[in-house]
């Protein structure tokens, strides 16, 4: 589904990401971990053509993201608050995203109904603009918006950060069900090793822009990761 | 432990903030332009100051030029206040990070206020006053008298400076920030004009009295101190962190914009733009500008003198029908800067995004033209000129402004309520509008004077129609420009401003 070809990004001669060949098959739940500056967000930004690669390219479904916009209909993401439109209410925001992805109000409403538990009564019908919601509730809105329109690739940067414990547990369940029928590819990054080992079947560890570990998740993975980061 | 003096630290911070911003680095041209603008004004004022004495002698041979000049100062004060309200902002310093550091609030406030005293606006009048004073002294006016008068004027300049910030901070709390100021200024002007209260004489005589006795300078000096203290208090209140951290949570109003569905695939963006305009302080002013723009013709047309200036009609027409276009258009795509990454990664084609902006501006022009039809009362030529201007706005100016937007690298913080952010608009935005209005006026004037009014109208309409005919091509060209600068824009917009 996603393939990088000699991909690298450098700022002022310093390489911050170098992924000569990374391939993520369809339906995989893919986790990215690494300390600050490891290149996680850089990789996601390259995937979404928000920044230009220094060398190489990324393809999603054989489409080069920097050359065509055809990857957009089946790719969705929530990277940070700049993916929210502060002056809309959550409902209006969801309908707007729905409009962009060819879903009418009824479709969006049906989807939102499934997430009532996830929102925990704090997002919908509150008569508040997104900018006035707390960071955690903003994140919930952003994550759900990324699920509108049946995307095939979902990219979430640090989805667990800022969420309360209840929502973290619900999000884990949600992410697991997403990849159940092997149709949707989910990419997440996290600083929480426990969460990421629970959710992802494959975990890649980045360090200063390089892949240092590429693991199929097993019983031993968490211990291995903890040892890696402790060292 | 030894501390660097606080003021030095602040100056250092300001310096870095200015020169390290991407805006500066990418807009050297704009800075050069501003510099020329400043030099132009300095030169004008200098010439005015030198020529004032002989000029007044010639126009009013019977009267004392010094007295006549003082009689005019009321208008200067009024104009200066208005001008500053729109152009001068309290120099912002990013204070939030300083609040938790061991920095005295007083020091921060004093620095911000002190810096404002060094504003260009305060020095500009001196370029006229000082040469005029020199001329007076050269013409045997007593030295002490003139020096005392000059000192009084400097105090008044500073009074205007600090008065303006108080007006701005009050105005920014209201829904229509421009309206009260314009009403008050207009009211004062009317009171004077219709001789109800002769403010011109009062201020003139007051200044003459100040020149007679140095002791009286206590009065403006006292006023200045009071204003400074008021400013200090206002800022101090704003400087508590909860003011900037906790935004006032207004209840969200949902607006039904189903009618936009008629516009097909650009409907979602139109809804977004309408909500953007209605729900953000910063963009709301564009609506009030509509009213001002619509009434703009009334400044000129009732005056028989201007009514003879037919070559000028197109300028007013461009302004009246294009006020929204210019005001809103020049910040495309910066209006969407805070969620630009979303737009760039969502299922959107650039073309559609730009098309919706174009449609919105075009509709505003049509609407403004329809609303301005009553100007026909002043003559059918005005209607014709306005129509030509509207066509030109749609066919030329919308594309120019969209194209210009692809060079936009400055983020707008729609919901920013940081401590000193009153209006967030500066001189630059007004300057951009000038070529959009002056070029058609010049073209029209040339044809008007060589071939007549009708020829001018036909040329302006022709230019507009040409643009409309090439709509598809122009939009493609503009879209490509935006595609090329996409990554630069994302980068600039994701920087903290």
Image (cartoon, rainbow, N blue to C red):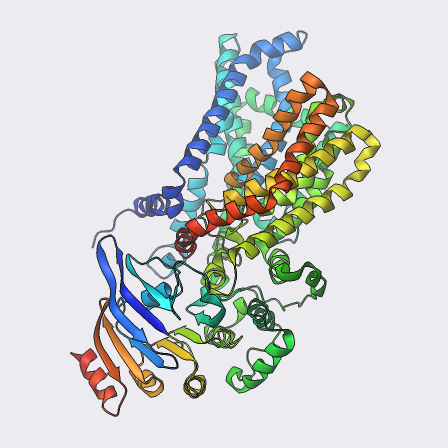
Q: Residue B191, can we see it? A: no
B10 displayed left or right of A214? right
Tell me if residue B204 comes above or below residue A172 in the rendering. Answer: above
Along the line of sight, the residue nearer the viewer: A167 or B209 = A167
Residue B465: x, y in percent? 66, 37
- Work out which quarter of the rendered image holds the N terminus of chain B and state it: bottom left
Residue B493: x, y in percent? 43, 54
Residue B41: x, y in percent? 50, 25
Residue at position x 22%, y 53% in the image:
A13
A143 displayed left or right of B84? left
Along the line of sight, the residue nearer the viewer: B64 or B41 = B41
Along the line of sight, the residue nearer the viewer: A60 or B407 = A60
Q: Quadrant of residue B402?
A: top right
Q: How many marks?
A: 0
Q: Quadrant of residue B320?
A: top right
Residue at position x 34%, y 65% in the image:
A58
Q: Quadrant of residue B451?
A: top right
A223 displayed left or right of B43? left
Residue at position x 47%, y 49% in the image:
B480
Residue most toward the bottom?
A219
Residue most toward the left?
A231
Q: Residue B83, can we see it? A: yes
Residue A121: x, y in percent? 56, 83
Tell me if residue B435 comes above or below residue B358 in the rendering. Answer: above
Residue at position x 75%, y 34% in the image:
B298
């Amino acid at each position: 589904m996603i393939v990088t070809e000699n991909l690298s990004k450098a700022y002022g001669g310093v390489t911050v990401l170098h992924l000569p060949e990374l391939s993520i098959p369809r339906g995989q739940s893919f986790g990215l971990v690494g300390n600050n500056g490891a290149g996680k967000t850089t990789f996601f930004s390259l995937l979404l053509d928000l920044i230009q690669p220094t060398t190489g390219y990324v393809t999603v479904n054989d489409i080069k993201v920097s050359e065509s916009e055809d990857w957009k209909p089946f790719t969705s993401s929530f990277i940070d608050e700049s993916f929210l439109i502060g002056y809309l209410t959550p409902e209006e925001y969801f309908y707007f995203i729905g409009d962009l992805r060819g879903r009418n109000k009824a479709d969006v409403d049906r989807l939102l109904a499934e997430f009532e538990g996830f929102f925990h009564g704090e997002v919908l019908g509150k008569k508040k603009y997104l900018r006035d919601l707390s960071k955690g509730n903003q994140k919930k809105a952003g994550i759900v918006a990324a699920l509108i329109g049946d995307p095939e690739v979902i990219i979430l940067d640090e989805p667990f950060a800022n969420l309360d414990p209840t929502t973290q547990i619900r999000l884990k369940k949600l992410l697991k069900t997403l990849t159940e029928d092997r149709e949707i590819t989910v990419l997440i990054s996290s600083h929480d090793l426990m969460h990421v080992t629970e959710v992802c079947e494959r975990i890649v560890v980045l360090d200063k822009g390089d892949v240092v570990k590429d693991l199929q998740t097993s019983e031993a993975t968490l211990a291995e990761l903890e040892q890696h980061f402790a060292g | 432990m030894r501390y660097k003096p606080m003021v030095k630290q602040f100056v250092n911070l300001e310096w870095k903030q200015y020169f390290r911003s991407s805006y500066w680095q990418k807009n050297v041209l704009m800075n050069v332009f501003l510099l020329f603008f400043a030099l132009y004004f300095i030169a004008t004022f200098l010439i005015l100051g030198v020529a004032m004495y002989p000029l007044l002698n010639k126009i009013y041979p019977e009267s004392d030029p010094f007295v006549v000049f003082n009689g005019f100062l009321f208008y200067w004060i009024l104009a200066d206040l208005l001008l500053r309200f729109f152009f001068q902002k309290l120099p912002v310093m990013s204070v939030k990070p300083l609040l938790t550091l061991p920095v005295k609030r007083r020091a921060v406030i004093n620095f911000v206020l002190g810096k404002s005293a060094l504003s260009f606006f305060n020095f500009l009048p001196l370029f006229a006053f000082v040469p005029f004073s020199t001329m007076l002294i050269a013409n045997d006016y007593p030295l002490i008298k003139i020096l005392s008068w000059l000192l009084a004027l400097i105090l008044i300049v500073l009074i205007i400076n600090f008065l303006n910030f108080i007006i701005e901070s009050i105005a920014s709390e209201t829904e229509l920030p421009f309206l009260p100021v314009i009403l008050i200024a207009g009211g004062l002007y009317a009171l004077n004009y219709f001789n109800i209260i002769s403010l011109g004489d009062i201020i003139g005589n007051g200044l003459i009295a100040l020149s007679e006795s140095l002791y009286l300078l206590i009065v403006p000096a006292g006023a200045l101190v009071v204003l400074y203290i008021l400013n200090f208090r206002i800022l101090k209140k704003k400087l508590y962190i909860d003011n900037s951290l906790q935004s006032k949570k207004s209840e969200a109003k949902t607006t039904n914009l189903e009618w936009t569905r008629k516009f097909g695939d650009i409907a979602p963006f139109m809804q977004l733009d309408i909500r953007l305009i209605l729900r953000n302080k910063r963009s709301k002013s564009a609506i009030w500008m509509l009213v001002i723009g619509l009434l703009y013709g009334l400044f000129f047309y009732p005056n028989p003198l201007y009514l003879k200036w037919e070559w000028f009609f197109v300028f007013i027409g461009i302004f009246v029908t294009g006020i929204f276009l210019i005001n809103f258009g020049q910040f495309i795509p910066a209006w969407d800067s805070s969620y630009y990454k979303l737009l760039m990664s969502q299922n959107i084609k650039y073309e559609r995004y730009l098309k919706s902006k174009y449609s919105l501006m075009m509709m505003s022009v049509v609407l403004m033209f329809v609303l301005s039809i009553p100007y026909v009362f002043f003559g059918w030529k005005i209607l014709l000129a306005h129509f030509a201007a509207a066509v030109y706005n749609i066919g030329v100016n919308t594309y120019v402004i969209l194209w210009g937007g692809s060079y936009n690298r400055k983020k707008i913080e729609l919901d920013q309520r940081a401590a000193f952010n009153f209006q967030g608009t500066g001189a630059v935005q007004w300057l951009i509008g000038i070529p959009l209005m002056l070029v058609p006026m010049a073209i029209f004037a040339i044809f008007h004077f060589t071939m007549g009014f009708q020829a001018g109208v036909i040329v302006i309409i022709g230019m507009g129609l040409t643009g409309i005919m090439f709509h598809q091509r122009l939009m493609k060209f503009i879209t490509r420009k935006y595609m090329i600068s996409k990554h630069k824009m994302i980068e600039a917009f994701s920087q903290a401003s």
